[in-house]
Image (cartoon, rainbow, N blue to C red):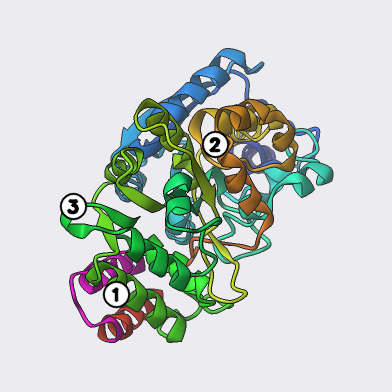
Amino acid sequence: MHPFHRIDRLLVLILIVLGATCCRGHAPTSSPTPLNPRGQIVTLWYPATYEEELLTFMDRFNASNPWGIALRGMRAESSAQVYEKVLQGHAEGKLPDMIVTRAGYLPEYVAQGLAVNLTPYIGDTRWGFSPQEQRDFFPAAWNVGHAGDPSHRYGFPLTLSAGILVYNRAWLHELGYDAPPRTWEELRTVACAASEPQAGIYGLKFPADERVFIRLLLAHGGHLLNSEGTAYTFGNEAGLAALTLLQTMVQEGCARPEEYWEEAESEFSRGRVLFVLTDTWHIPHYGRLVAGRAAFEWLASPLPAAGDASATEVSSAVFVILPTFPQRQLAAWTFIRWLNTPQQQAAWTTETGYLPHRRATMDLLAPLLERDPQYAAALALLERETVGEPEVRGYKDCRAHLQRMVQEVLAGGDPQQWLSRTVDACNVTLR
Protein backbone atom coordinates (compact mmCIF):
# COMPACT_ATOMS: atom_id res chain seq x y z
CA MET A 1 0.00 0.00 0.00
CA HIS A 2 1.26 3.46 -0.85
CA PRO A 3 2.48 5.27 2.31
CA PHE A 4 0.26 8.29 1.60
CA HIS A 5 -2.81 6.02 1.60
CA ARG A 6 -1.84 4.69 5.03
CA ILE A 7 -1.52 8.28 6.28
CA ASP A 8 -4.94 9.17 4.85
CA ARG A 9 -6.53 6.18 6.61
CA LEU A 10 -4.78 7.10 9.84
CA LEU A 11 -6.14 10.65 9.62
CA VAL A 12 -9.67 9.35 9.03
CA LEU A 13 -9.35 7.06 12.05
CA ILE A 14 -8.17 9.96 14.24
CA LEU A 15 -11.09 12.13 13.09
CA ILE A 16 -13.58 9.36 13.89
CA VAL A 17 -12.17 8.94 17.39
CA LEU A 18 -12.20 12.67 17.99
CA GLY A 19 -15.75 12.87 16.71
CA ALA A 20 -16.82 10.18 19.13
CA THR A 21 -15.21 11.71 22.19
CA CYS A 22 -14.78 15.44 21.74
CA CYS A 23 -17.67 16.67 19.62
CA ARG A 24 -19.62 19.60 20.96
CA GLY A 25 -23.10 18.78 22.23
CA HIS A 26 -22.81 15.01 22.73
CA ALA A 27 -24.47 13.33 25.72
CA PRO A 28 -23.98 9.89 27.26
CA THR A 29 -26.12 7.18 25.70
CA SER A 30 -25.35 4.17 27.91
CA SER A 31 -23.28 3.20 30.92
CA PRO A 32 -20.62 2.80 31.97
CA THR A 33 -19.81 5.85 29.85
CA PRO A 34 -16.24 6.74 28.91
CA LEU A 35 -16.82 10.32 30.00
CA ASN A 36 -15.39 11.56 33.27
CA PRO A 37 -16.45 14.94 34.71
CA ARG A 38 -13.56 15.06 37.19
CA GLY A 39 -11.99 18.47 37.65
CA GLN A 40 -14.32 20.29 35.24
CA ILE A 41 -15.13 23.97 35.76
CA VAL A 42 -18.76 24.72 34.86
CA THR A 43 -20.03 28.24 34.20
CA LEU A 44 -23.68 28.94 35.03
CA TRP A 45 -25.54 32.11 34.03
CA TYR A 46 -28.71 32.88 35.97
CA PRO A 47 -31.30 35.66 36.56
CA ALA A 48 -30.90 37.74 39.71
CA THR A 49 -34.22 36.43 41.09
CA TYR A 50 -32.66 33.13 42.11
CA GLU A 51 -29.17 34.32 43.03
CA GLU A 52 -29.03 33.99 46.81
CA GLU A 53 -30.51 30.50 47.04
CA LEU A 54 -28.76 29.20 43.94
CA LEU A 55 -25.32 30.34 45.05
CA THR A 56 -25.84 28.67 48.44
CA PHE A 57 -26.50 25.30 46.83
CA MET A 58 -23.74 25.75 44.26
CA ASP A 59 -21.29 26.27 47.14
CA ARG A 60 -22.53 23.11 48.85
CA PHE A 61 -22.14 21.12 45.66
CA ASN A 62 -18.63 22.48 45.08
CA ALA A 63 -17.63 21.47 48.60
CA SER A 64 -19.09 17.96 48.51
CA ASN A 65 -19.10 16.48 45.01
CA PRO A 66 -16.63 13.59 44.61
CA TRP A 67 -15.37 14.67 41.19
CA GLY A 68 -13.89 18.00 42.17
CA ILE A 69 -16.30 19.83 39.84
CA ALA A 70 -16.38 23.59 40.39
CA LEU A 71 -19.48 25.63 39.49
CA ARG A 72 -18.93 29.30 38.69
CA GLY A 73 -21.91 31.65 38.46
CA MET A 74 -22.60 34.85 36.56
CA ARG A 75 -25.64 36.99 37.31
CA ALA A 76 -27.96 38.68 34.82
CA GLU A 77 -30.95 40.85 35.68
CA SER A 78 -33.61 38.66 34.06
CA SER A 79 -34.25 35.67 31.81
CA ALA A 80 -34.46 38.14 28.93
CA GLN A 81 -30.97 39.40 29.66
CA VAL A 82 -29.62 35.86 30.02
CA TYR A 83 -31.00 35.13 26.54
CA GLU A 84 -29.43 38.25 25.06
CA LYS A 85 -26.06 37.41 26.61
CA VAL A 86 -26.20 33.83 25.33
CA LEU A 87 -26.94 35.00 21.78
CA GLN A 88 -24.04 37.42 21.99
CA GLY A 89 -21.78 34.72 23.42
CA HIS A 90 -22.84 32.31 20.68
CA ALA A 91 -21.85 34.83 18.03
CA GLU A 92 -18.49 35.32 19.73
CA GLY A 93 -17.89 31.63 20.46
CA LYS A 94 -18.06 32.16 24.22
CA LEU A 95 -20.97 30.14 25.61
CA PRO A 96 -21.59 29.25 29.25
CA ASP A 97 -22.01 25.60 30.10
CA MET A 98 -25.45 25.98 31.67
CA ILE A 99 -28.10 28.63 32.26
CA VAL A 100 -31.23 29.15 34.32
CA THR A 101 -34.19 30.68 32.54
CA ARG A 102 -37.97 30.84 32.63
CA ALA A 103 -39.57 27.82 31.00
CA GLY A 104 -41.21 30.10 28.44
CA TYR A 105 -37.80 30.97 27.00
CA LEU A 106 -36.78 27.36 26.45
CA PRO A 107 -38.11 27.00 22.86
CA GLU A 108 -35.98 29.97 21.80
CA TYR A 109 -32.81 28.14 22.87
CA VAL A 110 -33.96 24.93 21.18
CA ALA A 111 -34.67 26.74 17.91
CA GLN A 112 -31.17 28.26 17.98
CA GLY A 113 -29.54 24.88 18.62
CA LEU A 114 -28.44 26.09 22.04
CA ALA A 115 -30.05 23.43 24.25
CA VAL A 116 -28.69 19.92 24.75
CA ASN A 117 -31.22 17.09 24.81
CA LEU A 118 -31.18 15.83 28.40
CA THR A 119 -33.01 12.56 27.71
CA PRO A 120 -29.78 10.48 27.42
CA TYR A 121 -28.55 11.85 30.75
CA ILE A 122 -31.84 11.14 32.49
CA GLY A 123 -31.92 7.53 31.29
CA ASP A 124 -28.22 6.81 31.80
CA THR A 125 -27.73 3.91 34.22
CA ARG A 126 -24.78 5.56 35.94
CA TRP A 127 -25.54 9.28 35.80
CA GLY A 128 -29.31 9.41 35.45
CA PHE A 129 -32.51 8.47 37.27
CA SER A 130 -33.76 4.90 37.53
CA PRO A 131 -37.26 4.17 36.20
CA GLN A 132 -38.51 4.10 39.80
CA GLU A 133 -36.93 7.49 40.50
CA GLN A 134 -38.46 8.93 37.36
CA ARG A 135 -41.91 7.84 38.52
CA ASP A 136 -41.25 9.55 41.83
CA PHE A 137 -41.34 13.02 40.24
CA PHE A 138 -44.57 14.98 40.46
CA PRO A 139 -46.12 15.60 37.00
CA ALA A 140 -45.79 19.34 37.63
CA ALA A 141 -42.00 18.89 37.59
CA TRP A 142 -41.66 15.98 35.17
CA ASN A 143 -43.74 17.64 32.43
CA VAL A 144 -41.49 20.71 32.30
CA GLY A 145 -38.77 21.15 29.70
CA HIS A 146 -39.97 19.34 26.57
CA ALA A 147 -40.45 22.47 24.44
CA GLY A 148 -43.31 20.77 22.62
CA ASP A 149 -41.44 17.51 21.89
CA PRO A 150 -42.42 14.71 24.32
CA SER A 151 -39.55 12.50 23.11
CA HIS A 152 -36.92 15.06 24.11
CA ARG A 153 -36.20 17.12 27.20
CA TYR A 154 -34.22 20.33 26.93
CA GLY A 155 -34.83 21.81 30.36
CA PHE A 156 -35.01 20.49 33.91
CA PRO A 157 -36.78 22.43 36.66
CA LEU A 158 -34.95 24.47 39.25
CA THR A 159 -38.05 26.09 40.76
CA LEU A 160 -41.75 25.27 40.91
CA SER A 161 -44.38 27.64 42.24
CA ALA A 162 -48.15 27.76 42.02
CA GLY A 163 -50.88 30.28 42.73
CA ILE A 164 -52.45 30.19 46.19
CA LEU A 165 -54.74 32.31 48.36
CA VAL A 166 -53.61 33.41 51.81
CA TYR A 167 -56.24 34.85 54.14
CA ASN A 168 -56.82 36.28 57.57
CA ARG A 169 -58.88 33.58 59.26
CA ALA A 170 -59.95 35.65 62.25
CA TRP A 171 -61.20 38.45 60.01
CA LEU A 172 -63.04 35.95 57.82
CA HIS A 173 -64.81 34.59 60.93
CA GLU A 174 -65.81 38.12 61.95
CA LEU A 175 -67.56 38.44 58.59
CA GLY A 176 -69.52 35.26 59.32
CA TYR A 177 -67.63 32.74 57.17
CA ASP A 178 -66.16 29.47 58.41
CA ALA A 179 -64.17 28.60 55.27
CA PRO A 180 -62.50 30.41 52.37
CA PRO A 181 -64.61 30.99 49.24
CA ARG A 182 -64.89 28.11 46.78
CA THR A 183 -65.76 30.25 43.74
CA TRP A 184 -64.58 33.62 42.49
CA GLU A 185 -68.06 35.10 42.83
CA GLU A 186 -68.08 34.08 46.48
CA LEU A 187 -64.66 35.67 46.90
CA ARG A 188 -65.95 38.86 45.31
CA THR A 189 -68.84 38.97 47.80
CA VAL A 190 -66.60 38.44 50.81
CA ALA A 191 -63.92 40.84 49.56
CA CYS A 192 -66.48 43.60 49.02
CA ALA A 193 -67.88 43.10 52.51
CA ALA A 194 -64.36 43.48 53.98
CA SER A 195 -63.27 46.52 51.96
CA GLU A 196 -63.06 50.14 53.09
CA PRO A 197 -61.20 51.74 50.19
CA GLN A 198 -61.29 55.21 51.74
CA ALA A 199 -59.33 53.78 54.68
CA GLY A 200 -56.95 51.79 52.50
CA ILE A 201 -58.47 48.45 53.54
CA TYR A 202 -59.16 45.90 50.80
CA GLY A 203 -60.67 42.45 50.58
CA LEU A 204 -58.17 41.28 47.96
CA LYS A 205 -54.77 42.19 46.59
CA PHE A 206 -53.22 40.55 43.56
CA PRO A 207 -50.28 41.08 41.17
CA ALA A 208 -51.21 43.01 38.02
CA ASP A 209 -49.43 40.69 35.61
CA GLU A 210 -50.20 37.99 33.07
CA ARG A 211 -50.26 35.23 35.67
CA VAL A 212 -53.31 36.57 37.50
CA PHE A 213 -55.20 36.41 34.20
CA ILE A 214 -53.96 32.86 33.51
CA ARG A 215 -55.01 31.73 36.98
CA LEU A 216 -58.51 33.13 36.61
CA LEU A 217 -58.72 31.79 33.06
CA LEU A 218 -57.99 28.26 34.31
CA ALA A 219 -60.39 28.73 37.21
CA HIS A 220 -63.13 29.48 34.69
CA GLY A 221 -62.32 26.37 32.64
CA GLY A 222 -60.30 28.09 29.91
CA HIS A 223 -56.82 27.52 28.47
CA LEU A 224 -54.18 29.75 26.93
CA LEU A 225 -53.30 27.38 24.07
CA ASN A 226 -54.96 24.55 22.20
CA SER A 227 -53.66 21.05 22.89
CA GLU A 228 -51.42 21.09 19.80
CA GLY A 229 -49.77 24.35 20.81
CA THR A 230 -50.63 25.89 17.45
CA ALA A 231 -53.11 28.61 18.46
CA TYR A 232 -53.99 30.74 21.48
CA THR A 233 -57.55 30.09 22.63
CA PHE A 234 -58.07 32.41 25.58
CA GLY A 235 -60.33 34.80 23.65
CA ASN A 236 -63.50 32.97 24.69
CA GLU A 237 -66.11 33.28 27.45
CA ALA A 238 -63.67 32.05 30.08
CA GLY A 239 -61.12 34.71 29.14
CA LEU A 240 -63.72 37.45 29.11
CA ALA A 241 -65.13 36.33 32.47
CA ALA A 242 -61.65 36.40 34.01
CA LEU A 243 -60.84 39.90 32.76
CA THR A 244 -64.26 41.31 33.58
CA LEU A 245 -64.15 39.96 37.14
CA LEU A 246 -60.76 41.54 37.78
CA GLN A 247 -61.88 44.89 36.43
CA THR A 248 -65.19 44.83 38.31
CA MET A 249 -63.59 44.05 41.67
CA VAL A 250 -61.13 46.92 41.25
CA GLN A 251 -63.79 49.38 40.10
CA GLU A 252 -66.03 48.42 43.04
CA GLY A 253 -63.20 49.09 45.49
CA CYS A 254 -63.14 45.46 46.63
CA ALA A 255 -59.67 44.65 45.29
CA ARG A 256 -56.48 46.44 44.46
CA PRO A 257 -53.61 45.37 42.22
CA GLU A 258 -50.21 45.41 43.89
CA GLU A 259 -47.23 47.12 42.35
CA TYR A 260 -44.73 44.99 44.28
CA TRP A 261 -45.33 41.68 46.01
CA GLU A 262 -43.60 43.02 49.14
CA GLU A 263 -46.36 45.63 49.38
CA ALA A 264 -49.11 43.01 49.59
CA GLU A 265 -47.17 41.02 52.19
CA SER A 266 -46.70 44.11 54.33
CA GLU A 267 -50.36 45.16 54.13
CA PHE A 268 -51.55 41.64 54.89
CA SER A 269 -49.27 41.33 57.92
CA ARG A 270 -50.73 44.60 59.26
CA GLY A 271 -54.27 43.25 59.00
CA ARG A 272 -55.27 45.63 56.18
CA VAL A 273 -55.99 43.00 53.49
CA LEU A 274 -58.26 39.98 53.91
CA PHE A 275 -57.08 37.88 50.93
CA VAL A 276 -53.90 37.95 48.87
CA LEU A 277 -53.50 36.02 45.64
CA THR A 278 -49.83 35.07 45.79
CA ASP A 279 -47.34 32.32 45.00
CA THR A 280 -46.67 29.26 47.10
CA TRP A 281 -43.02 30.19 47.61
CA HIS A 282 -44.12 33.35 49.45
CA ILE A 283 -45.79 31.41 52.27
CA PRO A 284 -42.69 31.42 54.53
CA HIS A 285 -42.42 35.20 54.02
CA TYR A 286 -45.98 35.67 55.24
CA GLY A 287 -45.31 33.51 58.28
CA ARG A 288 -42.32 35.60 59.36
CA LEU A 289 -44.07 38.93 58.81
CA VAL A 290 -47.32 38.01 60.55
CA ALA A 291 -45.45 36.57 63.53
CA GLY A 292 -43.46 39.76 63.86
CA ARG A 293 -46.42 42.14 63.62
CA ALA A 294 -50.11 41.48 64.16
CA ALA A 295 -49.69 37.78 65.01
CA PHE A 296 -53.24 36.89 63.89
CA GLU A 297 -54.34 33.47 62.70
CA TRP A 298 -53.94 33.03 58.95
CA LEU A 299 -54.20 30.15 56.51
CA ALA A 300 -53.63 29.29 52.85
CA SER A 301 -56.01 27.59 50.44
CA PRO A 302 -56.26 26.69 46.74
CA LEU A 303 -57.57 29.40 44.46
CA PRO A 304 -61.33 29.52 43.96
CA ALA A 305 -62.74 27.86 40.84
CA ALA A 306 -65.80 28.18 38.65
CA GLY A 307 -67.73 24.91 38.70
CA ASP A 308 -65.52 21.83 38.51
CA ALA A 309 -62.50 23.62 37.05
CA SER A 310 -59.51 22.67 39.16
CA ALA A 311 -56.35 23.03 37.03
CA THR A 312 -53.54 24.80 38.85
CA GLU A 313 -51.11 27.12 37.07
CA VAL A 314 -47.49 26.27 37.83
CA SER A 315 -44.53 28.42 36.87
CA SER A 316 -40.95 27.25 36.76
CA ALA A 317 -37.40 28.24 36.08
CA VAL A 318 -35.36 25.57 34.32
CA PHE A 319 -31.76 24.55 33.86
CA VAL A 320 -30.58 24.38 30.26
CA ILE A 321 -27.24 22.77 29.35
CA LEU A 322 -25.63 24.39 26.33
CA PRO A 323 -23.59 22.50 23.70
CA THR A 324 -19.97 22.92 24.73
CA PHE A 325 -17.88 19.78 25.39
CA PRO A 326 -19.06 16.35 26.60
CA GLN A 327 -17.11 16.38 29.85
CA ARG A 328 -18.41 19.82 30.84
CA GLN A 329 -21.95 18.94 29.82
CA LEU A 330 -21.83 15.86 32.02
CA ALA A 331 -20.36 17.91 34.87
CA ALA A 332 -23.26 20.39 34.53
CA TRP A 333 -25.74 17.51 34.61
CA THR A 334 -24.26 16.14 37.85
CA PHE A 335 -25.34 19.35 39.62
CA ILE A 336 -28.90 18.99 38.31
CA ARG A 337 -28.92 15.34 39.37
CA TRP A 338 -27.56 16.18 42.83
CA LEU A 339 -30.09 18.97 43.40
CA ASN A 340 -32.93 16.55 42.59
CA THR A 341 -32.08 13.96 45.21
CA PRO A 342 -34.74 13.81 47.96
CA GLN A 343 -32.34 15.17 50.58
CA GLN A 344 -31.33 18.21 48.54
CA GLN A 345 -34.93 18.80 47.43
CA ALA A 346 -36.03 18.84 51.07
CA ALA A 347 -33.33 21.39 51.89
CA TRP A 348 -34.18 23.45 48.78
CA THR A 349 -37.90 23.53 49.63
CA THR A 350 -37.33 24.30 53.30
CA GLU A 351 -34.89 27.12 52.61
CA THR A 352 -36.53 28.71 49.55
CA GLY A 353 -40.26 27.93 49.77
CA TYR A 354 -40.31 26.54 46.21
CA LEU A 355 -42.31 23.36 45.70
CA PRO A 356 -40.45 20.02 45.78
CA HIS A 357 -40.06 17.98 42.61
CA ARG A 358 -40.31 14.49 44.09
CA ARG A 359 -42.74 12.58 46.31
CA ALA A 360 -39.87 11.04 48.26
CA THR A 361 -39.16 14.53 49.57
CA MET A 362 -42.48 14.78 51.39
CA ASP A 363 -41.41 12.66 54.37
CA LEU A 364 -38.44 14.98 54.90
CA LEU A 365 -40.44 18.20 55.16
CA ALA A 366 -41.66 17.86 58.75
CA PRO A 367 -39.46 20.76 59.98
CA LEU A 368 -40.90 23.04 57.29
CA LEU A 369 -44.48 22.12 58.13
CA GLU A 370 -43.84 22.59 61.83
CA ARG A 371 -42.50 26.06 61.13
CA ASP A 372 -45.08 26.95 58.45
CA PRO A 373 -48.13 24.67 58.73
CA GLN A 374 -49.85 26.74 56.04
CA TYR A 375 -47.41 25.22 53.54
CA ALA A 376 -49.42 21.98 53.60
CA ALA A 377 -51.94 23.68 51.30
CA ALA A 378 -49.12 24.36 48.82
CA LEU A 379 -47.92 20.76 48.86
CA ALA A 380 -51.47 19.51 48.23
CA LEU A 381 -51.52 21.35 44.90
CA LEU A 382 -48.88 18.98 43.51
CA GLU A 383 -51.40 16.14 43.42
CA ARG A 384 -53.87 18.20 41.36
CA GLU A 385 -53.94 18.76 37.61
CA THR A 386 -51.31 21.36 36.80
CA VAL A 387 -50.66 23.54 33.75
CA GLY A 388 -47.18 24.91 33.15
CA GLU A 389 -45.96 27.97 31.28
CA PRO A 390 -46.38 27.48 27.50
CA GLU A 391 -43.20 26.13 25.93
CA VAL A 392 -43.79 27.46 22.42
CA ARG A 393 -41.74 29.88 20.38
CA GLY A 394 -42.72 33.48 20.84
CA TYR A 395 -44.31 33.06 24.26
CA LYS A 396 -41.87 35.55 25.73
CA ASP A 397 -43.50 38.13 23.43
CA CYS A 398 -47.05 36.90 24.04
CA ARG A 399 -46.41 37.22 27.76
CA ALA A 400 -45.70 40.92 27.32
CA HIS A 401 -48.98 41.32 25.40
CA LEU A 402 -50.89 39.54 28.18
CA GLN A 403 -49.37 41.76 30.84
CA ARG A 404 -50.28 44.91 28.94
CA MET A 405 -53.84 43.61 28.46
CA VAL A 406 -54.28 43.11 32.22
CA GLN A 407 -52.90 46.54 33.04
CA GLU A 408 -55.02 48.30 30.41
CA VAL A 409 -58.22 46.57 31.55
CA LEU A 410 -57.52 47.38 35.19
CA ALA A 411 -57.07 51.00 34.13
CA GLY A 412 -60.57 50.99 32.60
CA GLY A 413 -60.05 49.57 29.11
CA ASP A 414 -62.77 47.51 27.44
CA PRO A 415 -62.21 43.83 28.36
CA GLN A 416 -63.59 42.42 25.11
CA GLN A 417 -61.55 44.73 22.89
CA TRP A 418 -58.32 44.06 24.75
CA LEU A 419 -59.00 40.32 24.84
CA SER A 420 -59.53 40.12 21.07
CA ARG A 421 -56.54 42.34 20.35
CA THR A 422 -54.28 40.28 22.59
CA VAL A 423 -55.34 36.91 21.20
CA ASP A 424 -54.50 38.17 17.70
CA ALA A 425 -51.15 39.56 18.87
CA CYS A 426 -50.21 36.31 20.60
CA ASN A 427 -51.14 34.21 17.58
CA VAL A 428 -48.81 36.37 15.49
CA THR A 429 -45.95 35.44 17.83
CA LEU A 430 -46.55 31.76 17.07
CA ARG A 431 -45.83 32.42 13.40
Q: Is residue 51 visible?
A: no
Nearest to the observer: residue 164 or residue 192: 192
Please report whichever mark, 1 or 3, sits nearer to the chain's N-terminal start.
3
Residue in view at x 36 percent, y 45 percent: 86
Nearest to the observer: residue 244 or residue 171: 171
Residue 338 position, x and y percent, is: 64, 29
Helix, strand or loop status at disc 1: helix
Dot in front, 3 or 2: 3
Q: Quadrant of residue 33?
A: top right
The residue that mark 2 highlights is 325
Please report whichever mark, 1 or 2, sits nearer to the chain's N-terminal start.
1
Please report whichever mark, 3 or 2, sits nearer to the chain's N-terminal start.
3
Left or right, residue 330 beside residue 282: right
The residue that mark 3 highlights is 199
Residue type pointed to by label 3: Ala
Residue extent of the magenta highlight: 396-416
Residue extending farthest top: 63
Specify the quadrant that holds the C terminus.
Answer: bottom left
Residue type pointed to by label 1: Thr
Question: Is disc 1 in contact with disc 2, using a CB cutoff of under 8 Å?
Answer: no
Residue 277 position, x and y percent, is: 41, 55
Q: Quadrant of residue 210?
A: bottom left
Dot in front, 1 or 2: 1
Residue type pointed to by label 2: Phe
The residue that mark 1 highlights is 248
Specify the quadrant that holds the N terminus.
Answer: top right
Whole-angstrom CA distance, mark 1 to mark 2, is 55 Å
Residue in view at x 54 percent, y 69 percent: 305
